[in-house]
Image (cartoon, rainbow, N blue to C red):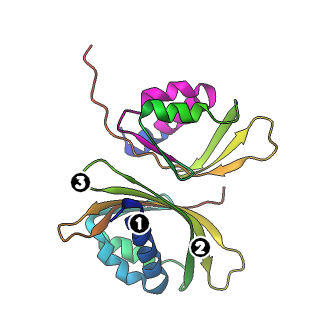
Amino acid sequence: MDPNALAKAFMEHYYNTFDTSRSGLANLYQQSSMLTLKGQKIQGASNIVAKLTSFPFQQCHHSISSVNCGNLQITGKQHPLKLSQVLSLSVKEPCES
Amino acid sequence: MDPDALAKAFVEHYYSTFDTNRNNLANLYQEGSMLSFEGQKIQGSHNIVAKLTSLPFQQCQHSITTVDSQPSGVNAAMLVFVSGNLQLAGEQHALKFSQMFHLIPTPQGSYYVLNDIFRLNYA
């Protein structure tokens, strides 16, 4: 798959999962993953998802206009917030099934 | 050196060099480096610097709002994510931008930019 198409598909999956069920993001991180959120560094999938699910809003919607630029609309708030995010994607080893 | 301090020093060096003499940025890239500039992918140090020196302004000033860095997996490589304002000479309002650098250690004990992604934030 073309890297741009793959990145776009991943992005849609990531933000759709964030907006509908943040716990589902646990599948996208591993123990070696790190999230820096507004300067705070959080290590490991369970800590990252605990952080993302502890936000003081229940519902939100991301609209992404370009790589590293978008809007975050929080339910009940009038104006969207602008956001930038970098995701470094590593190949996941296939599971034995 | 602490990784956050190293990232901050790199960022100060990069934008100071950009704002005073863009040609000198050639030292920070290699032939394997890639810049995505507003979605356009440019490969190699020579082509990257040609692009940066061909931008339609002669003078600019970057002011940095945030710098975040993380180790990026192997051999002390780092991801650095910058947000800030870009003031062009003669323009009244600064433009907002964000930029990501993937820094790789060199055998000489320095760092070079392997991956560089730049976007203005106007949407």
Chain designation of label 3: B
Q: Position of residue B74 (x, y in %)?
A: 25, 49
* The disc label shown at residue B75, or none: 3
- Frontmost of labels 2 and 1 is 1
- Frontmost of labels 2 and 3 is 3
The answer to whether marks 2 and 3 sit on the same chain is yes
Quarter of the picture containing the N terminus of chain B is bottom left
Residue interval drawn in magenta: A9-36
Report, in whole angstroms, how far the alpha carbon at label 1 lies from the one at label 3.
Answer: 18 Å
The answer to whether A53 is drawn above or below residue B43 in the figure is: above
Q: 10 Å neighbourhood of mark 1: few (<14), some, or many (≥20)?
A: few
Residue A86 is a magenta residue: no
Chain designation of label 1: B
* Dominant secondary-structure state across the stretch colored magenta: helix
Q: Which residue is mark 2?
A: B86
Q: Earlier in the sequence, mark 1 or mark 3?
A: 1
